[in-house]
Amino acid sequence: MSQSGSTAGGTTGPRRRRRRQLIRVVGPIRPSTGIQRLRRSLRGGGFSAVVSVSTHVLIVTVMTWFLFERNDLRLEEPLDLRWLTAREVEQNESSRAPVRISSVPDGTPTNPMPPEPAPETPVPTPATRPAVEPVDVSGRLALRTPELRRKQLLEIDEGGKSDLAVRSALGWLRRQQQPTGNWRLHEGYPDAGRRTARTDTGATALALLAFLGAGFDHTRGEHQQTVARGVNWMVGQQRADGNLFDIDEFGREETYYAHSMGTIALCEAVALTADRRLRGAAIKAVDFLVKTQQPTRGGWKYQPQTAQSRGDLSVTGWALMALHSARIADIEVPEQSFVLASNFLDSVEVQDGARYRYEPEFDVSQAMTAEGLLCRQWLGWPREHPALESGSRFLLGETHRPRWDGGRRNVYAWYYTAQVLHNMGGGEWEAWYRAVRDEIVSHQARTGSVRKGADVRGSWHPSDPRGQSAEKADIAGRLYLTAMCVLILETPYRHVSVYEVPGSSDEESPTQD
């Protein structure tokens, strides 16, 4: 085909179509009429003539350009906010990606998650992440016998400061017991806790743990009747589903703290005495914890967890300790519960497990780091694990050195720090224990009335001075602070270090008084 033929066939046709389109838009242009209008305007000789001509020319030019060039325009594709299917992602990988939502409907912050690997692709395990293998628990309460307890204190408690303080505090706790066998946080003695923090289960569990920690159970010893009445009240309080909390209201902050502490107390009493009656109650309490654990993330909080909820480390630490106490009492705990708990710890750790937070969006703290490290120790992390060594140095730092000063004291953090360092052992642990012992003992009330309602002798004042806000002693009151101080002082003999091989020393064959 000739060049002229190509031009006529390929160009003239479209131009005619565009011309017809232009005529439809602006109407047919009649030369005679247009020229007459132009002549009339020019005869006027005014400025309006020039403006009119220019305007008409501009309009026609723009419309013509638009019609002639519209086939070359490329409109940008509208933003597509739909989640792409796997096939769409594969086809458009270079230009499209799924929209990442920064929060869920209830406002809980969520971190953007990387694309999940294909099911057949194994997720690599970090080289520093040990397998979840809970420690051997046999013989962990062996040091609570009188002879071995004294032996431990002779090595670390020069002058018997700790032992005297514990005995005096247990006397105060005994005098605060209610006729029904329970204890209370919110009333009955000076500087009690606020009524909003009331829980007789929590108060009773704390008191029982203090007695049991020194080796006093419900079958023998100086405080046999006191412990027996407390244990009986706890068993009578338990509900059909195993829950030990004394208030029929899930969601209260005290709910799972109180239940977990009560479970630990029952399990320790079973482990020390092999009491079959208590064993049934302890099993039910443990089952309640197992059934209400978060089913995928593994934590606990203030109410039974679901797939949509999330736990916190503070509650989870107490619940996990209850499951370890169950093992000490030879009560079976599903392995999956420990695996899930480890998953939760992964979600709140920092620096490969050397630091810990209350929840993922919170800052690192001494208390949460100590609690997280203790959980890792019971779940099988070896003593030489780099994260444990780093975390221990963090807890031993000058910033966290125990001081009973206003805004500085934090017995909650000291309680967990004491256990972590005791498990690690060595001179640094002994030096830290002596420091915390001296701070605690020097602030115990040694004198004063023992009259009911005014009794303070052997206890500690919860708000003089006021500790850190996270300690919450000013909210939970004198009994809470007193019990926590006793548990800290009892650390050298309350549990055998998780890194001591059972049977490697003479704690397996105690000599009774």
Image: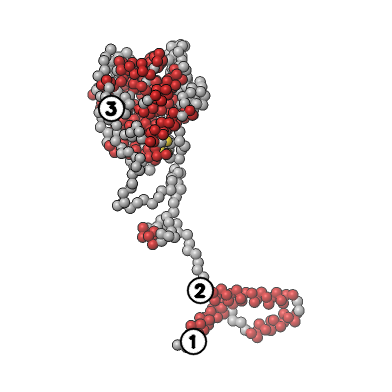
Q: Secondary structure at mark 2?
A: helix
Report the disc number at residue 472: none
Give 301 or 392, whichever is nearer the viewer. Answer: 392
- Mark 3 touching mark 1, by CB under 8 A? no
| Amino acid beneath label 2 | Asn
Q: Which residue is mark 2?
A: 71
Mark 3 = which residue?
501
Q: Depth check: 233 or 298 in front?
A: 298
* Label 3 or label 2, whichever comes before in sequence order: 2
- Quarter of the image for the C terminus: give it: top left
Q: Residue at x 39, y 24 (%)?
A: 427
Mark 2 or 1, nearer chain start: 1
User: How far is disc 3 from disc 2 in space, using C-alphas?
Assistant: 83 Å
Q: From where the camera sits, is residue 3 visible?
A: yes
Task: Return the residue nearer the eye: 349 or 337.
Answer: 349
Which residue carries the number 1 mark? 3
Q: Nearer the viewer, mark 3 or mark 1?
A: 3
In primary-sequence order, the first of circles 3 and 1 is 1
Give the crowd class for mark 3: few <14, some 14-19, many >=20 residues within 10 Å. Answer: some
Which of the image's four quarters has the N terminus? bottom left
Q: Amino acid at mark 3?
A: Val
Q: Is residue 111 above or below residue 285?
A: below
Q: Is residue 182 visible?
A: no
Q: Position of residue 61 (x, y in %)?
A: 61, 76
Q: Are marks 3 and 2 in contact (CB under 8 Å)?
A: no
Q: Position of residue 495 (x, y in %)?
A: 33, 24
- Residue drawn at the location 30% of the way across and 15% of the way down: 147
Q: Secondary structure at mark 1?
A: helix
Residue closest to the eye, 67 or 330: 330
